[in-house]
Structure formats: structure tokens, C-alpha cells
Image (cartoon, grey):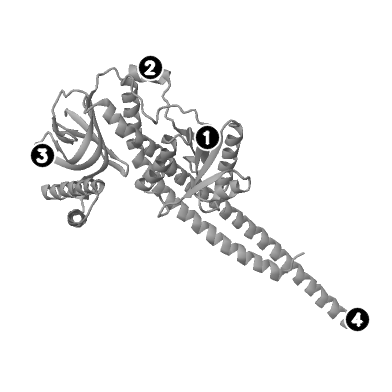
Amino acid sequence: MSNFSLNIFTPAGIVTDGFACEELIIPTESGQINVLKGHTHLVTKLGTGIVNAKLSNGQTRHFTVAGGLCKILGEKINILAKTSETAEQVNQERAKSALSKAQSRLQGPVTSVEVIKFQRKIERAKARLKIANLK
Amino acid sequence: MANVKELKVRIGSTKSTLKITSAMKLVSAAKLSKAQARIQGFKPYSHELDKTVRVASALAEGYTHEYLKESSSKNAAILVISSDKGLCGSYNSSLYKKVKAFIRSETETNFKLFFIGRKVKELLARDNYLQTKTYSYAKADPEFSEANEIVTELADLFKQGEIGKLYVAYNSFVSAIEFNSTVKQVLPMTVTAEEKENLIKEFPVDFKYEPSAEAILDSLIPEVLNTTVFTSMLDAIAAEHATRMTAMDNATTNSKEMIRDLTITMNKLRQAAITTELTEIVSGAESLNS
């Protein structure tokens, strides 16, 4: 019997449903949290990064997430992310071009709102590239 | 009585109509299955989000958000989601009737109308209701971000106090042959005291909130509004394709029946003409012999 059942839902569709895992590392807005058996009930805002889900056979599965909500209730973990992908779904070319585009835009004149926007884009692109190499 | 030539032309044109309607039926069926897949992918997200926010706002005592507050304003807005294209049975007319009845029943309120899709707009234009703005999205299907832009604009009106209530009117998908015309209130979001009680009973656990319940709710409540409206859009699109599919199926059946009837009439006429000609020839030959 596994410790957790992980659901990741996004507006674009279900990424994973009832995924059984033993241990999780989740990027929240205020830093990464490690979720072990018997974790307290928690509702938190998600940051941008990679969710690592450790399986009972020692392997690890990765999912990118960007913004949203994470709810831990007993052994059920629901992640409602604005976007989320598995390593297989990541388009590396697109992530690379998005990264360089956002970086070059940051060099030019930008407003403070745009700075945040492009920094988020960079974070998302970096998470995607990282997960693609973790495969 | 029409002659054989005229009937032949009519059969020909009905046959081409049949081809069009059966092709449109197939197209709608394909679009429907896509729309259904989309809504099924989206529903878990919106459902879970809605539930979390309800629970959190019920448990967080003394929390208020501007979207939760009742307003005294006598103005209200309706976002009417109809289709751009016709040939979908009673899809638009039924929604039109529903919206009109709703506006009539709320005599105290002044309504502003916002539209997605032009069909119901055209119908309502004849009745001189106050029409404000029409939205459209880039492609045939809305993107979540496009829906968010529309919602932000309407929510701003609510925040500024220009409108006291926001409704969404759309056809909700029930099955391939059925839809429900609905007018749903989306702002302010109200949770009744009874509902709160039930939620508290259902979730007796103590949640820990990070960074705080207020901060989470502040960012999630607008998201709930977005998902509610987006769900309505997806629902309306699924219903549109379903209705069109059914309408085109009926049209195909009717065309087939019409072709059969016309062919029978044509054959009868042709036979009658042949019989007359034969009788004439025989009687002509008889008169020569005698």
C-alpha cells in the first residue's frame, strides 16, 4: 500500500490521476516541501518548479508545475496547477526558444510588471528543460 | 400537378442538400467528441478548486472578499453565450426566450447585456434591450486565457460598483439530444449558512494554510470566477455541436424521406404518361383498321 495518491489537474486537462507514490517533493511559493507519510493537512500556494514523486520501487517520476494550489488531505494530494507536464510532454525546442526570448526581453527596457512576467517565463522554461534532462 | 422534369430537378436539389446535411452531421459529431473531451479534462480542475475555496472560505472565520459581498446596486450584467452560426435547431431561440423571460421577471433591475456569439444578440436587438459589448475569441474554441480577459473586464465593473450582479446565460449540455438553457449567477459568489454548516461537518480536519488562508483565498477566488465562466463556455460549445448534430440528423432523415416521396410521385407521373401514350397509339391503330 502506497503512502499517497497524487492527482494533478490543470485547466487543459488531467495530467495524472490517482498516481501512487511514497514520498514527494513539492515546490511551494515559499520554498520546497518534502511530503512524507503522516503529513499534516495542508493547503498551500504552488510555486514554479518540479514535483518529484518517489515510487515504492525507488524510481522517481517528475512533473513540472507552474502556479496554483496544492492540497494535502490525509493520503490524498491534489495539485491544481495553471500548467503542468510530464517529462514526455515537454517540448524542449519550445522551452529553449521561450527561455532565450524572455532573457533577451529582460535585457531591453521593461516595466516592473514585465520583469515579473518574464522572470516567471524563465522559471517555467528552466523547469521544463531540467525535467526533460531528468528523463 | 408538377411534371416529370420539374420533379427530377427537385430530387436533384434535395439530394445535394442531403449530402450537405449528412456531412455537417459528421463534422458536428467529431467536434462534439472533441468538446466533450475538453470539458471532461477541465471539470476535475474546476470542481476541485471550487470545493477547496468553499471549504476554506467557510472555515476561515470573518473572511470577506469583494467577490463575496452583496451589492446594493440596481444594475446587473448578463453574459450571453450563444453561437455564431445557425443550423442548430432551437439552440439560440431557446436561449433567447430564457434570457428575455429572465429580464422580464427581474423588473427592479437594469440589465446590461454582454455577448459571446452573435445569434442571440441579433434576436435581442429587435427588442431594444441595452446592449453593451460583444466579445469574440481568436479561434472557434476559447482558450482559458481568453476567457480570463473577458472575466477580468466584467469583474472590474463589479468591483467598481457599476453592476451589483453578474449572470451568465448559456445552454448547458445534457446529452446529444438535450440541453438546458440556464441563467446562472456568478457574482457575488454566495455560500449560504446551511451550506457552510455542511461543509464544516464534512471537513472536520484542521487545515494548515501556507502562507495564510486569506492570502490563498485572495488569489483563488478570482480563479474560481474564471473557471466558472470558462466551464459555461465549454458547456455551451458542447451543447451547440450536439444540437447541430441532432438537427442535421433530422434534416438528413427528412431529405431521404422527401426524395423517396418525390421519386414515387415522379414514377407515377411517368407511368401515367406512358399509359396515355399507349392508349393513344392503340386507339389510333384501331381506327385505321376499322
- Name which residue type carries label 3: Gln
- Name which residue type carries label 4: Ser
Q: In this orientation, does residue B169 appear?
A: no
Mark nearer the viewer, 1 or 2: 1
Label pair 3/1, CB-CB below 8 angstroms: no
Give neighbour class at mark 4: few <14, some 14-19, many 20+ (Cα, 10 Å): few
Percent x, y for residue A3? Answer: 16, 28
- Name which residue type carries label 1: Asn
- Name which residue type carries label 2: Glu
Residue at far left of view: A58
Q: Above or below — where is B282 with respect to A108?
A: below
Residue at far bottom of view: B288
Q: Which mark is residue A59?
A: 3
Q: Quadrant of residue A68?
A: top left
Q: How many marks?
A: 4
- Sequence-earlier tag: 2 or 4: 2
Q: Above or below — where is B30 with respect to B71?
A: below
Residue at 26 percent across and 46 percent down: it is A113
Report the residue marked by disc 1. B75
Label 3 in the same subunit as label 1? no
For numbered disc 3, what is the local secondary structure? loop
- Sequence-earlier tag: 4 or 1: 1
Percent x, y for residue B162? Answer: 47, 36
Mark nearer the viewer, 3 or 2: 2
Label 1 in the same subunit as label 2? yes
Determine the chain carrying the residue at label 2: B
